[in-house]
Image (tube, helix red, strand yellow):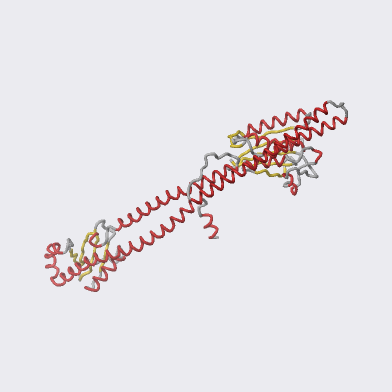
Amino acid sequence: MARGWFRRSMPRGLFGRSLLIIVMPMVLLQAVVTYLLFDRQWEAVTQRISRGVAAQIVLFVQSYETLGPDRFAAEAERLRETSFGLVPVIKSGAMIPETESPTYEILKQVFGRELSSRIGRPVWVDSDSHEDQVEILVQLDGAVLQVMAERKRVMSSNTHVWVLWMIGTSLILLSVAILFLRNQIRPIERLADAAEAFGKGRDVPDFRPSGATEVRRAALAFLDMRERISRFVQQRTDMLAGVSHDLRTPLTRMKLELAMMKDDATAQALAGDLEEMEHMLDEYLAFARGQAGEGASETDIGQLLRDIATSAQRKADAKTAAKTVDLSVNEDLLVEVRPNALKRCVTNLVENALRHGNRAELSASQHDNMVEIIVDDDGPGIPPEQREEAFRPFHRLESGRTLASGGVGLGLAIARDIARGHGGEITLTDSKFGGLRAVVRLPV
């Protein structure tokens, strides 16, 4: 229980934890040093100076006992000149208070020990009631000897200078540590921001390695990794583009030859096959292209979804299919994305929904630092154990959403590839209409 609370109370960030590692030992060290030196120094100085006052009071008591009350009162003013400003006052018939002396323990020990050992009289000391003076009362026979001493004559009064000096030096050292540590942490934060932006598919052209040697090595490794990933994506795109171009040439010749043939059942079947092959080539190229070639920009998600819904509804109407596309966007959502790629991602999900059902509903909302785009349909759905398999490229489910429904098995794979290229994810769950729900989550 205590261990869990300790973990929760610890700072999460590297700056906070590093600062704690530096500050905690410094604070503990300063506290121990301050306590030991301050306590010892204050006690030693107070003992020395208060012993002199105690010795002078002993002389007052001895003079009182030797001279008697009358003669002692007459000699009081003269004693002031030889006792460094201490003036004894005799209060006849008085008694010292029975309450505990309102003073520091060290003063009680010094005056009590000195006066008791030398004259054997009770003593009462008050260092709290007077601002600049300490009142010392000694019980005599039928009277009380009162001595008002300046506070600086009895105890060390410059201890606050020591405390302020310790606090001041600690603050200076702490400020230097914070500035130095902040400069060391900032390159790590920039590296983390650059990696996060790259994970969301955003360019970071202004990122430069900086900081300590280890941080620079990590930054250079990140730049090399980014370059390798970008080169791999580009090579994949170029390869598929080349394959698509090479295959389109014979397809075009086949289309021309087919156009010169008689319009019979065989020709229509061949035309259908060619159209399907061309569609497959487009799908392959789109899957291979992924996130290459388009920069991220601030995009109105609501407007993007409206365009997708309008286009999908227009296509459905053109095919005279009784299918509807509903839209539910409650707020303006501005997110930095690659608009064309995200449009293709959501379009694939909407087309997939309309292919297997008669109704699709698009909705979008923001939760904390994530934007959710939801596509619901009323189709047959996908069993939970097969939902992850539906994202596999070229994979066709055997039930529910069948081969006869069309497609080449790349729609969901392309959609997930685009979502992950934005640093997000796509999950499949049950729809409120009884079909399938696809949820696209994108970081803001």
Q: Residue at x 80, y 41 (%)?
A: 402
Residue 185 at what x, y percent from top left?
Answer: 48, 49
Q: Residue at x 27, y 69 (%)?
A: 112
Q: Is residue 39 above or below residue 418?
A: below
Which quarter of the figure is the C terminus placed in?
top right
Quarter of the image holding residue 118? Answer: bottom left
Q: Nearer the viewer, residue 129 or 400?
A: 400
Residue 400 at what x, y percent from top left?
Answer: 79, 43
Quarter of the image holding residue 193? Answer: top right
Q: In this view, does 405 lie above or below 57?
A: above
Q: In this view, does 233 lie above or below 45?
A: above
Quarter of the image holding residue 421? Answer: top right
Residue 407 placement, left or right of 336: right
Which quarter of the figure is the N terminus placed in?
bottom right
Q: Nearer the viewer, residue 75 or 14?
A: 14
Residue 371 at what x, y percent from top left?
Answer: 62, 40
